[in-house]
Amino acid sequence: MTAHPRGEHPDSPADADDPTAPQPPGPAAEAPADGGADAAPDGTAPDGAGEAGAGEAAAAPDGGGTGEASSPDAAPGGTGAGEPDGDGARTGADGGGHAQEEGDGGQGAARAEGGEGSAGGEAGGGAAGVSEAEAELAAQRELRERIERRKAERAEPIAAGTKLSGRAADLLAAVRAVESGRTPDVAFEDSPAPAAPPRRVAPPPAPPARTPVAPVPSGPRAAAPEAVAAVRTVLGRGGAPEALAVRVAGALGDTAAERLREDPWLLLSVPGVRPEQADAFARALLGADCGPGDARRTDALVGWLLEQAALRGHTALDPSAVRAGLAERSVPDPEEAVRHAVAEGAVLVFHDEDDEEDEDGESGGGGEGGGEGSAGDAEGGASPVLLGLDRYALAEESLADGLARLARSGPEPRWAEAAGPPELVRAVAAQGLVVHTGGEAARAEPVALAGAARALGLRAAVAVHSENGRRGLGPEADAVTVAALMSGAAGPGRDEDGMLALDLLVVLDAPQLDVEAAAMLVESVPDGCRLVLSGDPYVLPSAGAGRVFGDLLAARVCPQVASRVPDAGPIGELVSGIGAGELSQVDAPGREVVIVPVRDAGEAVHRTVQLVADSVPRALGVPVEQTQVITVGHGGSAGTRALNAALKQRLNPGPGRFGGFDPGDRVAYAQAPGRTVQGRVVSADAEGLHLDCEGRPERVVVPPDRVESAVRHGWALTAHQAAGMRWPAAVVVLPGDAAGGLSRAWVYTAFGRGERHLSVVHGVDQALARAVAGPASPERVTRLRALLEAVPAAEEA
């Protein structure tokens, strides 16, 4: 369920000084010199790797370390804010002290509403219809409403007989008449015992017609023009950029102007707005009536801290982390602020208690609790307490219910004759939910299972994270992306109950499912359908909140099948060792793995451009279009901005006349949070930037107001953006200032993106070996594992 009522989702805000346009030649800022590749596997550099390339220039430094996350600075009296990129780079949040992931390193600014779509741009494509992202958002919104409706119905008392009709209502009336001593008005004939209700299964294998999805805006809901005008007036009075009006009205609704006047800190609900910017806005509107302990401010800050934690993958936080974040923002009584936010329903509080406490009558496993003091007693009490937002609580509870439903599915005799991988076939035949783990080569096993199901006449589908991954499986796999499957743009369609018309669903790249997307997916799987979640447990987790695949593995509520198929070749050997925590030297006689030592970030940029534009194509025969650069973050002197600027100058120089882009530029388009599609710029006009994206037969038109937040140059990506994708050649850049952003999962993911060749531009010295030997991946605070483990106990009780 990736729909976000607050707008858009994870990433570092875009910078006003984003150097996406070509940069003039100039020296790059030097990082500490890190010579040698002692911690890395050795290899022979491609021809020319040590030679200086003529005409190459490193991009100017971006101003921040690539391993750190930062956020927009507040202009005096302003509330400038950038939108997220949706690729998994993390906006810095102060509430948790948790490990930060890919940073931006730049400074945010408000984005102009109209963008820079030039009227003189070339003509391209007609107006886009309902896009895949729009259809997905519509489906997500519908699912969210259904879940909230269901939870509300559970909480409400139901008057006896109010939901009966027809024969059942007559029976109830007769019973009440007999109880009161009257003669029933209706006579009933003897009838046989009612048959057991049929299982909710997918309909017969007739190709169902796809239900059209109404178009919705890609982002916040569209507000009425008069509401936007009213918001623009309020923003102007408070000294905030009026360009925020559309986003504010979309996030707060048609009464946004009135709500902002009463509570200026609601501005924090708009993604990218910082607390200091909201404070300046509130002072301009309220004057002396506002202070650091204002309950409106503290409630907004508590919610903002939890939203920032979600950008780092957490679905909940310990109250102590929230209190620490409040104290850093000058809240005079953080403990009272947390209590007030809980009492007002701004956040939820969860208790995870042991069996003994449950027997004593206290709230148990994962239940919600509230009231004064419930969060403040976390440290002194015996039970852990977590704070969370309702959107993630709903998603995790819905997902736990759905997974438990599938796990309870019993044996299915139809699978006895399947000819697929024996261990997988036995697991699927025994239970409705199966987890499959393995590397890149292991992906063939669940694909073969889907083929075996089709051979039996069963309806099977294979879903992957990205178009790149779908293409990599080949046409015989008949795979679709998860986004296309859920939106109805591809796949089997839905039955009359809105469920996927399937007997088997195989989901590859399952670690990339965030908790909301996973909840929406599982909610759509009918009873009787087998669900196989397959993925590599060592890769980076999802860009969105949650740790679905890892929590499911840890909970052990279903069969787990571990593939024994190893990844072949020197790259496979290297990556397998990294997964086990070892950085070993591998033999690469065909130059499959190459280490390029660099002394500083400027040399790292120079060597990267030389590898992509000259050495790899000439020595290995891999064209530029099939080589991908991967680095730690967007900011810094060798982040994606600096690398893309240098690569554009070499590969497609131009003035950047369309908002920093030129026809032919390679781009990464964040069409939805956490999902990046690669493409090329075709043209631009008043409608927006026209892109030719992989897997899309029609041109994609990005509106002018979304270009700066959703489109980046794509020669260089972050590892989170690259997850679930592979290329014939990958160049991984590790400048000295990136050491703090490395982890074993990051190195494993980045090094595994090359199919035939991997070049490592190495400037972090021993930091690489330390990262590989460290923890598998940064911890995420979630509730899903506890909810899953509580299901069997609840059923026994």
Image (cartoon, rainbow, N blue to C red):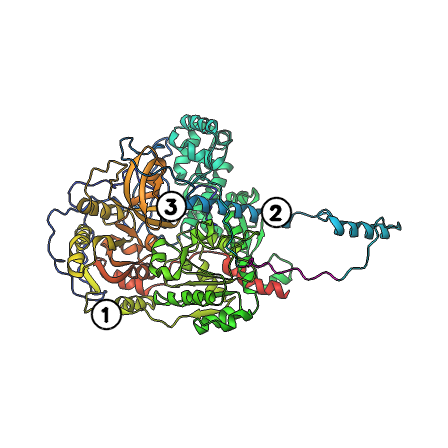
Name the element at disc 1.
Answer: loop
Location of the C terminus (image quadrant): bottom right
Q: Which residue is mark 2?
A: 152
- Between 715 and 542, the residue placed more toward the observer is 715
First reached walking from the N terminus: tag 1 or tag 3: 1
* Front disc: 3 or 2: 3
Q: Which residue is mark 3?
A: 671
- Between 351 and 157, the residue placed more toward the observer is 157
* Residues shaded magenta: 193-204
Main secondary structure found in the magenta portion: loop
724 vs 426: above or below: above
Residue 21 percent across, percent down from the top left: 23, 40
* Dots 3, 2 in contact, CB < 8 A: no
Query: Residue 169 lies in magenta, yes or no?
Result: no
First reached walking from the N terminus: tag 3 or tag 2: 2
Q: Residue sitting at 40 percent across and 70 percent down?
A: 563
- What amino acid does circle 3 point to? Gln
Residue 671 percent across, percent down from the top left: 38, 45
- What amino acid does circle 2 point to? Ala
771 vs 65: above or below: below
237 vs 504: above or below: above
First reached walking from the N terminus: tag 1 or tag 2: 2
778 vs 588: above or below: above
Distance Cα–Cα, label 1 vs label 3: 38 Å
Residue 444 percent across, percent down from the top left: 38, 66
Q: Which residue is mark 1?
A: 586
Instruction: Determine the residue located farthest toward the front in the rendered image.
Output: 206
The answer to whether residue 22 is left or right of residue 140 is left
Q: Quadrant of residue 33?
A: bottom left
* Front disc: 1 or 3: 3
